Amino acid sequence: MTLLALLPLTIWTYLLIAHSRFWLARERDTAVPHAPLTWPSVVAVVPARDEADVIARSIGSLAVQDYPGEFRIVLVDDGSTDGTGAIARSLGASQVSIVDGTPLHPGWTGKLWAVEQGIAAAGTPRYLWLTDADIAHAPDTLASLVSRAEAGNLVLTSLMAKLRCDTLAERALVPAFVFFFRLLYPFARVNRPTGIGAAAGGCMLIRADALAAAGGIGAVREALIDDCAVGALMKRQGRIWLGLTDRSVSIRRYDGWGPVAAMIARSAYAQLRYSPLLLAGTTLGLVITYLLAPALALFADGLARGVGLATWALIALSFQPMLRFYRRSPLWGIALPVIAAFYGGCTLLSALQHKRGRGGMWKGRAQAAMGR
């Protein structure tokens, strides 16, 4: 029993010390580099499908960017039926162009097909700012992104938008979402000249010539987890940077556990490359990493119980920096194993939905079923 207890302890000792210190959440956009001598041209591309409840605030935040250079906004209305395009037009912002999206092209996910149309309408700016319709940005966001990109000669500069964390379900699950993302893609490794590639889809500033050299957005046309696919694509073209931010915030509300579960399940199985073997291994890994130690702490005795308690404490400790970032109680750290179990259940749900032909469901589209 003691040897069994040492397994999760060993895992968490490695994660806290040797896994690029992912849990410390140090990579942030608080320190902005000096402004460039000349401000390059930028076009924001916003794909939107049935976003009537958030589009005014989202596009409004883009329209008031305090950016000294040339800046335009292209909104692609991706077959909305709720008046999204009309709301955007009613804002009357001169720098906003509305593109009525064409029907989904075979071989593409819906979002990326909309992005492709937006890029085609953008012309030839130095940078493309790909941002989602449910993200609102502080007025200095674009200037900050461009300053960092120009100073670091970056081909991709991405911010992990701060997600809403107000309802009970959001408080329980949202900080963990970012925590698990950083576990899979440690930002320190992403930001090194060599290493893994990743990005956060809500806010990606991409050098247009580098994207074209990589084959354009069509090079990842089938990707359900499109942001990380773009990150990996651009990493092959040059340096990229990914960090946390308070400047860009998600304004989509998740009322209840069901909507959050649906958000997780939409892409969880895609992360495992639709592999039943990887699904089984991941489920076993979650049990060993997150659930074994609390189970021993509660039900074992002697040394095994002590090791289980110590490991549970490490699990709770690892969650503290992210909880502070989201201004949540440190006691949520104790619940991280239960939260991990919820995410594991959502991953199994994702696999089940994929088997039923409803994988990657978003706004009426079962995108993960394509080509599988």
Image: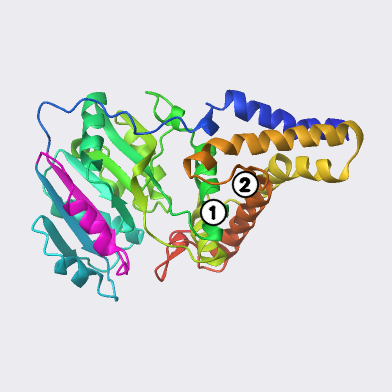
Any part of residue 276 in sight: no
Q: Residue furthest right?
A: 302
Mark 1 = which residue? Answer: 171
Task: Find the distance from the CA under tag 2 to the CA under tag 1.
Answer: 9 Å
Residue name at image x 20 percent, y 37 percent = 143
363 up-or-down from 240: above or below: below
Quarter where residue 140 is shown: top left
Which one is nearer the viewer's eye here, 277 or 143?
143
Residue 310: x and y in percent read 76, 32
Q: What residue would you read off at disc 2?
A: 332
**For mark 2, does the 10 Å Cα neighbourhood hold few (<14), some (14 to 19), or many (20 or more) residues?**
some
* Residue occupying image coordinates x 67% and y 27%: 13
Instruction: Determine the residue positioned at 45% across, 28% down.
Output: 189
Between 330 and 259, the residue placed more toward the observer is 330
**For residue 160, above or below residue 59:** above
Quadrant of the drawing holding the N terminus: top right
| Amino acid type, residue under disc 1 in the picture | Arg
Q: Which residues are magenta?
A: 41-69
> Residue 77 location in percent, x, y?
23, 66
- The answer to which of marks 2 and 1 sits earlier in the sequence is 1
For the image shown, how many numbered marks are present on the structure? 2
- In contact (CB < 8 Å): disc 2 and disc 1: yes
Q: Is residue 66 magenta?
A: yes
Image quarter for residue 78?
Answer: bottom left
